[in-house]
Amino acid sequence: MLREPYHFMSLKEEVILLDDYTTKLLSLCCKMSDLLAEGITVVENVYKNREPVPHMKAIYFITPTKKSVDGLIDDFISKSSSRYKAAYVYFTDTCPDNLFNKIKSSCARSIRRCKEISVSFFPYESQVFTLNVPDAFYCCYSPTLENTKDKDAVMEAMAEQIVTLCATLEENPGVRCKSTPLGNASRLAQLVEKKLENYYKTDEQSQIKAKTHSQLIVIDRGFDPVSTVLHELTFQAMAYDLLPIENDTYKYKADGKEKEAILEEDDELWVKIRHKHIADVIEYLTLSSLAHLMKKMPQYRKEITRQVVHLNIAEDCMSKFKANTERLCKTEQDLALGTDAEGQKVKDSMRVLFPVLLNKSHDSYDKIRAILLYIFSTNGTTQENLDKLIQNVQIESDSDMIRNWEYLHVPIISSQQKQPRRDRSSEETFQLSRWTPLIKDVMEDAIENKLDSKEWPYCSQCPPTWNGSGIVSARQKPKASYQDERRSNARLILFVIGGITYSEMRCAYEVSQAYKSCEVIIGSTHVLTPRRLLDEIKSLNKPKDMVCIKDE
């Protein structure tokens, strides 16, 4: 779905030139073997010096920036010294007039095709995208950048990127956000709506393309703080929280050797089990391993290797879980929901929290996560109580991981009324996995046409037709063809400013499976883990030059 823009590979050319941005983008969409299958034998960096191959044509897949355009022009500075026979240029976004004119005056004769393909986003999974701008969290929520040109530039850039996603999906969605007096969601939603109008202008009379049967909902990260700090026990979320997985790469030992495995969409087993509860994953992997071992045939070697990788991940997760996390999970669930596993109301949240704070085996991050859940559950606490908690747990140096949530408009000291939730008391869950991310409520309410139009207003005067009665739950019908069926119907896109969690990503798949006629796509500036988020929260009140932003 998100890989459709790459149809231009059918040109069967031999060299492709990339810049740093498109190198990462292409690596998420295809492998070298895929390029070879399309006749691409050489991949080069447009910024670097290269040996000329004047008998070959070249594809330039680059961003419309001065540095990348200069790299293109340098390859065709004169006809006698051209590095390639001809150029086929594809920009990820709209090329500014000054750069386009520079290309026309310098090397127009060498260019056979020049096209803007609108793909300034990163397909992270089949139903998940990111903008790959982790510094947007600081720019959007730090008080040091409020009402500055830096923040304005980031908001404009995010809006442009979101529009390229909509263009790629051929959607002109109705844009809406939660109505709040403060926050970034309303501002970004308005920018996206305006840029969608400009993008879909069809003639000189400024006739706008009609809205498609889709919605784009923009949400601030402070909308659901609980899901960002809770320990999750579904496989993907648990692994990324508890294990040192970096750049989607898991390191493990097998046969006495250090090995690496990439957790990606091409791994069918990973895709099949990543959203399952850890207990179900272990049971599934154990049974599957036994079946493959019984066959012991060469054609099953690849499957057995993947079984080993995921068994290693599951065992590592369970080792961490049994050591410390299991005791935390009950406390966290009770605080998050305000009820225990039997449905009894928690009368004294501090009594629930206290054993975690006294336990010396829990590190400061886990204690801070528990304190935050206590504060979220009580809709804020007193200044005196907060100071005592910080002092008693001896986390003075990390206290901004708690205090700075105020910049996301999450009450830490003052209190406000809790937002109502969908009733999920009849749903079957594990006792330590009772919490459901708030974004799932939004997804289901949007599909069923139950989102209050005053609380979640549209930015445009002509929102799309969204017939909630036409949405049918897959629980009532066979699921065999739900993917093909829903792709031809409505599409719901959600964008969270400041990062999404793996549990929220899982919700997109769950809701898509439950509602046959709607596909849910979720995206954000970047993907979060609890530890990473707390580090980013801590940095919000620091000057920009003292903040180190880690890329994905």
Image (cartoon, grey):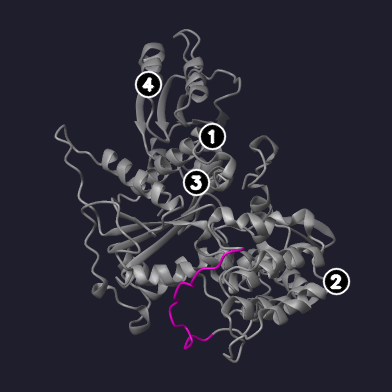
Left or right of 469 in this view: 307: right
Provide the residue span drawn in magenta. 413-428
- Magenta residues: mostly which secondary structure? loop
Query: Could you give the CA–CA distance between mark 1 and mark 4, rounded to whole angstroms?
Result: 28 Å
Q: Amino acid at mark 3?
A: Leu
Q: Identify the mark at residue 360; answer none if there is no mark.
A: 2
User: Going from the N terminus, do you reach mark 3 or mark 4 first?
Assistant: 4
Query: Could you give the CA–CA distance between mark 1 and mark 3, rounded to whole angstroms?
Result: 29 Å
Q: Identify the mark at residue 100; answer none if there is no mark.
A: 4
Of residues 547 and 486, the one drawn nearer to the viewer in this rendering = 547
Q: Amino acid at mark 2?
A: Lys
Vertical placement of residue 409 versus 468, above or below: above
Vertical placement of residue 270 versus 31, above or below: below
User: Going from the N terminus, do you reach mark 3 or mark 2 first?
Assistant: 3
Q: Secondary structure at mark 2?
A: loop
Q: Nearer the viewer, mark 3 or mark 4?
A: 3
Query: Could you give the CA–CA distance between mark 2 and mark 1, rounded to whole angstroms?
Result: 57 Å
Q: Identify the mark at residue 41; answer none if there is no mark.
A: 1
- Whether 336 is among the magenta residues is no
Q: Identify the mark at residue 365; answer none if there is no mark.
A: none
- Image x and y of residue 272, in percent: 54, 70
